[in-house]
Image: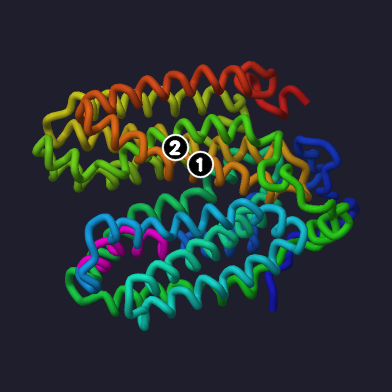
Amino acid sequence: MSVDTENHAPTGQVPVTVERSAPGPAHSTGPERLVTPTFVVAWVVNFLQYLTFYMLVTTMALYAVKSFAASDAAGGFASSAFVVGATVARLFSGYLVDALGRRRMLLISLVVVTVACALYLPAGSMPVLIAVRMVHGFGYAFASTAVMTIAQSVIPDSRRGEGTGYFALGTTLATAIGPALGLFLVGTLDYSWLFWTTLVTAALGLVLGIFLREPLAQREAQAQAERAKFSFRDIAHPAVVPIGCFMLLVGICYAGVITYLNAYAEDRGVTTGAGLFFVAYAVAMLVMRLVLGKVQDQRGDNVVVYLGLICFAVALGILAMANQDWQVIVAGAMTGLGYGTLMPAAQAIAVNAVPSHKLGTGISTLLLLVDAGVGLGPVFLGLLLSAAGFGAMYTVLAVVVVLAAIFYHAVHGRHPHAKRGRLAVD
């Protein structure tokens, strides 16, 4: 049995061909249904991948310290080794997803993720734990690229922003549930329960992946696309690099929030507010993603992106000055409206910039640059924090958001389809 129901056109209509020879989507003449079996199964698989990631990322550093008497720095690397593996995979995940097939690469990567989750249980030393984290990150990068590409391939072009926003709700829910569930399991039970839970979650994702298939039209278009030899364009697609660089700047700012929030809370005496920060973040994101995707489709990219930039700059400004819990909670909500709005908006822009047989490369290019910003940001921000403190650091990051807005206007926002919507221009 497989999910393969979207390839049938209504009586009297010609099936829609999805292959695009030039950047930008071709318009469908059939009914533009958004919620399809393929979309729903891809949504659940994506949610399970991110749930596994967030359950582990909040607990790995302390696990390494407690289980292997590791230093804080070594424990931190045990957690971030996942990102190292993911970043390496991003360099060629898009090309392989496009060249070898989305579903094939999804299934292979889901097997790798499941095996990695099983290996957390017997990992008996720091080097083994770090190796498992890298392998997990490697498989996760391929799985996330492949499942996002499959989901994007069945989203109607005229509902790209809306569909991307709905798909991103899975990541939002994982952000809200994963850390809390991981901390609950290790606090109430023990780490073996955490690892068994992540293994079951990964295995469920693999089972669902077996039943996930693209529509026939999508498979035929991908099979017919000419496959060139691997080149730099397959690491970073030129059409996506500009919006990816914009998100790199935004990712640096987001890294300043997620990396230093706990230390900031202790320094300012706002631990209660910090504990509710991501709750407010997730609630605001959930509400606005139900609305802003449609706005992006109908009114263009700019209205959504500039709103997100304003909200994110305000959030960072509040953090620079906050000394009460309620202020930190408000900053969490504004971060959700800011970064939480910008990420799906940028993904929709990236997908619209590449032909259908390059969806994997386009998505991996964006994710690679975002990961670079989130991963490299703490290195530079740590130096700034040591020299000037939290207030100065968050003030500088608010300025970086303003610079990112200027950069966005230069590379994308000034174009007609960004101002009025791609469909209106076409």
Residue at x 77% of width, y 52% of height: 230
SS assignment at label 1: helix
Residue at x 50% of width, y 48% of height: 168
Look at mark 1 in the image and give the residue it sits on.
370
Q: Nearer the viewer, residue 295 or 122?
A: 122
Residue found at the very far left of the displayed protein: 269
Q: Which residues are magenta?
A: 51-65
| Residue 59 magenta-highlighted | yes
**Callout 2: 10 Å neighbours few (<14), some, many (20+)?**
many
Q: Residue 325 location in percent, x, y?
A: 14, 36
Q: Quadrant of the N terminus?
A: bottom right
Residue 177 appearing in the image:
no
Q: Residue 171 location in percent, x, y?
A: 45, 52
Q: Amino acid at mark 2?
A: Gly
Q: CA distance from mark 2 to mark 1?
A: 6 Å
Q: Residue 308 location in percent, x, y?
A: 44, 28
**Image disc number at residue 86:** none
Q: Nearer the viewer, residue 22 or 135?
A: 135
The secondary structure that most of the magenta stretch takes on is helix
